Amino acid sequence: MCKIQSIFKEYYPQYAEKYAIADHARKAAWNIINCRTEVMGGHVEKCPEGHYYRIWYNSCKHRSCPQCSTMEKEEWIQRQSARILDTHHYHVIFTIPHQLNDLWLLNPKEMTNLLFKCAKEALFGMMENEDFLGVKPGMIATLQTWGETLIFHPHVHCLVTGGGLTEDGEWKESKKGYLVPVRTLMKIFRGKFLDRLHNLVYKGEVEIPEEFSYSKVHRKLRKLRKKKWNVYTCKKYAYGEGVIKYLGNYIKGGAISDKRIISYNEKEVKFYYDDNKDGSKKKVMTLKTEEFIRRFLLHVPMPHLKVVRYYGMYASCKREELDKCRETFGQDKVEDIDKVSWQDYCEEYGDLAVCPVCGERLVKGKEFKAGELKLLLLLMGKELNSDLTLRDKQKSA
């Protein structure tokens, strides 16, 4: 059982009795608590020659579960690494001011769509402008709503090609050593975001805090036009794999990985974080256990909300354009990547999914639902050891 699962299993029930929790967050907590337990059901993994059997409980596959997301992350990273162009890329980050957090929490779907849309339009608008480059690039964008200490901090990470297709369908790269002027990009992004948000507020299409009037919200938005927004472009990367792996860490698994947890008890949780205001030095954060659970659940995305989006030649509907660009760089057409098998996954992470007697790879056997394990064992004439391996009843007599 992982540390975060243990924290939720031991302390979430008391938390849930004291505080109001959104339905989608309750579902996430239930999945985290029961992931890879008998509640989820499971299946038998067996040697094809009949030498060995073991029980494997099912994963919950919830995108906020830190325990069962590794295989899906790896598949996503492999799939994107096989698609991206063999050219330099840029990592661009768009962040909205914390003064908009209250509106975001009331309208997560609308604000997420707005952030993605305005980031894409600002960047593509500049790159398509002949004064800058005059091309349509490719972009993969992922939403992240948390900072290192799990505070609420909505922003999008974008992997952007350092060039793109001209109107004539030719590839053209940036020769300036940078993607676009960041200060100009920030102003365009800020203007687009606030214009559209003003319009949504005016039409009553977003919910506003009870203590706010519409005029007060509009005054707040006007003040934000004078504030510098955080839009950042990292130095260019020779290829995009590094950024792909970085983005892959945030598409599933929740706001914090299990390996960052140092210790926990009913009073507090301690975990590592990188202090970006102090040269990314590794430090230790201590939160009350209730506050840790609150912050974790704060970042559970709404159901069906797309937190990864693809634009330009990286969009799924632009495969023909992408293949043409790949030809320019001497790459083959994009091919579908085989899913990572559970045997390969287990072996990569130290669990050799092979029979200890003959060395054959284990295969999937009988499945069982929650509460059916005892019946399955009875039908198989076997009993369960403490390490979840199976043995014949008559042999253990």
Image: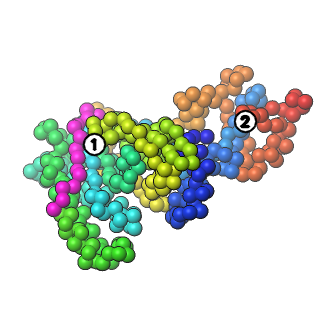
Q: Nearer the viewer, residue 270 or 56?
A: 270
Report the label total: 2
Q: From the viewer's perspective, is 111 left or right of 44?
A: left
Element class at badge 2: loop
Q: Residue at x 34, y 54 (%)?
A: 153
- Seen in the picture, residue 61 relative to 392 is either above or below; the reply is below
Q: Is residue 227 magenta?
A: yes
Residue 228 occupies quadrant: bottom left
Label 1, residues with CA under 10 Å away: few <14, some 14-19, many ≥20: few
Q: Quadrant of the N terminus?
A: top right
The residue pinned by badge 1 equals 277
Residue 342 occupies quadrant: top right
Give how far across and how far down residue 237 sits, in percent: 26, 35
Q: Residue at x 84, y 32 (%)?
A: 392
Residue type marked 2: Leu
Element class at badge 1: helix
Q: Nearer the viewer, residue 61 or 101?
A: 101
Task: State the extent of the magenta-drawn residues as a range.
Answer: 226-240
The residue pinned by badge 2 equals 388
